[in-house]
């Protein structure tokens, strides 16, 4: 490879790196709620904040548009997309089924160490209720449920669960932001789930409890949109 070719490759790699950094930064701000639905994304301002030129930011915005997180409006420009309630409904309904199955299959394989880890996370969630932070609570919620379904021996079901959680993230779903009262109930239901697993309840009972837990969160959210 010639010296010129090497130099060009280095410039291209640096540009890709900045584009990736811009993509990660903007996506994080959308998911965390810093950029709320309808927020106008001014490329020059974002570029200035990140210390980049506009080019990698524009590439990042295009990528986020392809993922559905950003949309272009005529005479407005790039704005953060709103949460699609229908997509959220379908995602939560699907996740309640596959996560319930994964949790039931995992239960016999969850040892006392994993139970203790889940309880520690749930304790953090309980503390989080005092000065409620929906984004942190949602992250802890995922950590808690990961302990319960990560031992699922069926890789296909586990893959569907991961896809469901990833889709929720792309929807920027922190349901608890809209129904903070549901958070306290969720913590109590977590403990009930752990007790079922500790007491070696049958798979159907555990699966039903896990599904109802997810469905209760969905119902609470839907009650605010009707």
Image: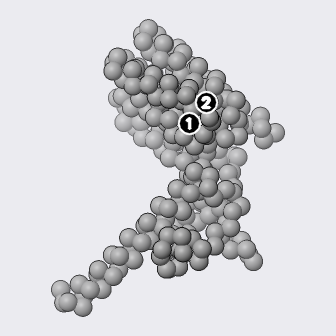
Badge 2: residue crowd in 10 Å (few <14, some 14–19, many ≥20)? some
- Upstream in the sequence, badge 2 or badge 1? 2
Residue 211: horizontal and vertical position, in percent? 57, 25
Please indicate whether residue 105 sits to the left or right of residue 217 in the image: left
Q: Is residue 53 above or below residue 39?
A: below
Q: Position of residue 23 (x, y in %)?
A: 49, 65
Nearer-the-camera pick, 15 or 219: 15
- Residue at the right extreme of this rendering: 226
Q: Position of residue 61 (x, y in %)?
A: 55, 69
User: Which of the pair 34/201 is nearer the observer?
Assistant: 34
Real-space Cα separation, disc 2 to disc 1, in angstroms? 8 Å
Q: Viewed as shown, does residue 84 lie left or right of 108?
A: right
- Label 1 near label 2: C-beta < 8 Å? yes
> Compared with residue 221, is residue 207 higher up or lower down, i.e. above or below?
above
Name the residue rendered at 65%, 61% in the picture.
80
List x then y, in percent, for residue 140: 50, 35
Depth check: 126 or 161 in front?
126
Q: Residue at x 54, y 75 (%)?
A: 48
Quadrant for the C terminus, please: top right
Q: Is residue 28 visible to us here?
A: yes
Please, which residue is most extreme toward the left here? Answer: 1
SS of the residue at dot 2?
Answer: loop
- Residue furthest out toward the top: 199
Label 1: which residue? 137
Q: Is residue 94 above or below residue 184?
A: below
Vertical comparison of 189 with 96: above or below: above
The residue to which callout 2 is attached is: 129
Does dot 1 land on a helix, a strand or a loop? helix
Q: Quadrant of residue 224?
A: top right
2 lies left or right of 82 = left
């Amino acid at each position: 490879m010639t010296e010129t070719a090497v130099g060009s490759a280095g410039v291209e790699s640096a540009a890709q790196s900045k584009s990736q950094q811009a993509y990660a930064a903007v996506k994080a701000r959308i998911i965390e709620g810093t950029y709320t639905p309808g927020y106008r994304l001014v490329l020059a301002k974002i570029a200035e904040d990140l210390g980049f030129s506009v080019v990698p930011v524009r590439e990042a915005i295009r990528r986020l548009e392809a993922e559905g997180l950003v949309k272009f409006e005529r005479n407005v420009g790039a704005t953060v997309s709103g949460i699609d309630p229908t997509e959220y409904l379908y995602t939560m309904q699907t996740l309640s089924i596959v996560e319930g199955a994964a949790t039931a299959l995992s239960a016999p394989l969850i040892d006392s160490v994993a139970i203790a880890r889940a309880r520690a996370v749930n304790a953090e969630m309980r503390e989080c209720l005092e000065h409620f932070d929906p984004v942190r609570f949602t992250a802890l919620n995922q950590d808690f449920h990961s302990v319960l379904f990560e031992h699922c021996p069926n890789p296909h079901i586990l893959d569907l669960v991961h896809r469901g959680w990833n889709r929720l993230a792309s929807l920027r779903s922190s349901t608890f932001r809209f129904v903070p009262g549901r958070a306290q109930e969720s913590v109590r239901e977590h403990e009930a789930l752990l007790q079922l697993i500790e007491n070696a309840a049958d798979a159907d009972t555990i699966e039903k409890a896990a599904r109802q837990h997810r469905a209760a969160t969905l119902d609470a959210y839907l009650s605010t949109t009707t």
